[in-house]
Amino acid sequence: MLDWIGSLRVREHDTRRVVLGLSPTTRIAGAASAAIGAAGIWYVWSFSALAALFPGALCAFGAVLATLERELVFDRAAGTLSIRQGVFGLGTQSVVPLFHLRAVVVMAKAGLGSGASSRFVAYLDRRVGDSIYLDEARRCAGLLRLAEAIADVAELRLEYDAASSAG
């Protein structure tokens, strides 16, 4: 239902570089939630300070979403993947050589519980170390476009596994 919050989108794509970033709707949803929460605090505060906890939590959640940053830059000329992530202006940046990456993987993941629909997960499989999570969605079309852009520029193998796996 809320797949569009926090999802990655291709910002730039040419033959030598791909830039992925969070969708603009993430910031919009965060700002709207923070504004609704702040208005709720102002309105409810006159009745009870305890009742203002729920709008306060909504406001805090909205502030986190509004300031959330995630950018991945695949640069063929430099031979690197730069990952920048942060919230509230505080963040981390790491650089991974492209030769450390083995493949871009899009695979189905079985839903939890009975009758739950499966979801698709996209990640970068590394030769050494843990995989790098990219995104998750109910439909694979957007993830495949993302994976194809990465595989094209970084010259990685694209693996697609449509069969649901348990766990």
Image (cartoon, rainbow, N blue to C red):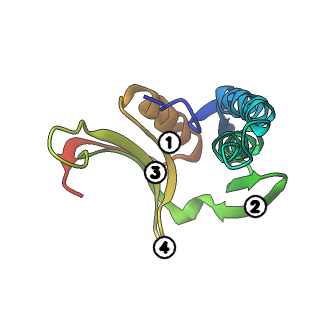
Q: CA distance from mark 4 to mark 1?
A: 18 Å
- Closest to the camera, between mark 1 and mark 2, is 2
Which residue is disc 4 drawn over?
128
Classify mark 4: residues with Cα within 10 Å, few (<14), some (14-19) or many (20+): few
Please name the residue that numbered disc 2 is placed on: 93
> Earlier along the polypeptide chain: callout 1 or callout 2?
2
Image position, residue 3 (x, y; %): 48, 32
Between 106 and 76, the residue placed more toward the observer is: 106
> Amino acid under label 3?
Tyr
The span from disc 4 to disc 2 (Cα, nearest Å) is 19 Å
The span from disc 3 to disc 1 (Cα, nearest Å) is: 12 Å
Residue type, label 1: Ala
The quadrant the C terminus occupies is bottom left
Nearest the viewer among 158 and 85 is 85
How far from the left and from the top, in percent, is residue 34?
Answer: 74, 35
First in sequence, mark 3 or 1: give its number: 3
Residue at numbered disc 1: 151
Mark 4 element type: loop
For the residues labelled 1 and 2, the Cα–Cα distance comes to 22 Å
Task: Specify the label residue 16 is tagged with.
Answer: none
**Other-residue count near label 2 (Cα within 10 Å), few / some / many at <14 / 14–19 / ≥20:** few
Viewer-side label of 4, 2: 2
Q: Nearer the viewer, residue 122 or 29?
A: 29
Q: Position of residue 8 (x, y in %)?
A: 59, 37
Q: Residue furthest right?
A: 89
The answer to whether 39 appears left or right of 3 in the picture is right
- For disc 3, the marked residue is 123
Indicate whether 109 appears above or below 25: below
